[in-house]
Image: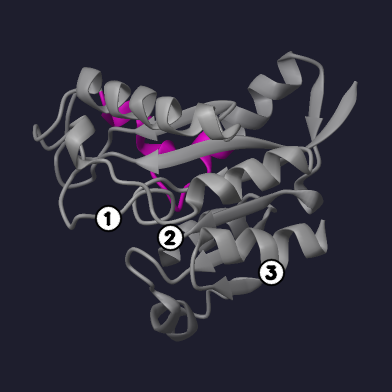
Amino acid sequence: MQTIKVLFLDRDGTINQDTGSYIFTREQLILIDRADEAIALAKSAGFRIVIVTNQAGIARGIATVEQIEEVNRYLNELLVPRNAGYDRCYYCPYHPEYPHPVYDRFMDFRKPATGMVERAIDEFLAEGLVVDRSASFFVGDKTLDVECGLRAGLRPVLVRTGHNEEALCLQRNIIPEFVADDLYKAVTEYILASA
């Protein structure tokens, strides 16, 4: 068994710009400045990269599974040339206000629930890789990302891009280890310095 460290990343608002609506076409996906560079630096420091993203637009009928998977593939196409491709990518199609016979079983995957993180850890384990949670980080732009990281025993970092819910985190007493202006600063100023 080999021990690994993982950088869990939210997608919209953390890696790519949050447009304020669901992103389900290639054209809508625009990387945040230096996000690819940040991921490349984390990878070269030995982190596995796992994306965990709520995509309730599927349950709401706004986007299809195929569209979301295509956007995720396109994201990797943008990242790979910069040596920033992800190792795994998980998305949750469920939304509590839009019941759906197919998607309701993913209830425990919707952040802040930890289903996507636990599945990633289980799938790494099946390959003989043990995730060291104490050396692994969760970066996102929302309170629910910080809460998911805390619940999963990871080290949560909040970025001010996307929704920037710094005030909401404090209000709800869901406190990240570090707050950074963006993913690049999260990686260079904190994650690599702490790893």
Residue tagged by mark 2?
144
Amino acid on which disc 2 is placed: Leu
Residue tagged by mark 3?
189
Q: Count neighbours of disc 2 (C-alpha within 10 A) and say few if under 14, some if 14 to 19, many if 20 or more.
A: some
Q: In screen coordinates, is 69 left or right of 145?
A: left
Q: Is residue 78 magenta?
A: no
Q: Is residue 58 visible?
A: no
Query: Comparing marks 2 and 1, which lies closer to the viewer?
Result: 1
Image position of 3 with respect to 138: above or below: above
Q: Is residue 165 visible?
A: yes
User: Residue 97, how many percent across, how many down?
Assistant: 16, 47
How far apart in space, not on screen, are marks 3 and 2 (Cα)? 23 Å
To which quarter of the image does residue 125 belong? top right
User: Residue 112, how many percent across, how many down?
Assistant: 45, 53
Residue tagged by mark 1?
18
Q: In screen coordinates, is 160 left or right of 114?
A: left
Q: What range is drawn magenta here?
A: 103-117
Measuring 47% from the left and 40% from the top, which residue is drawn there? Answer: 52
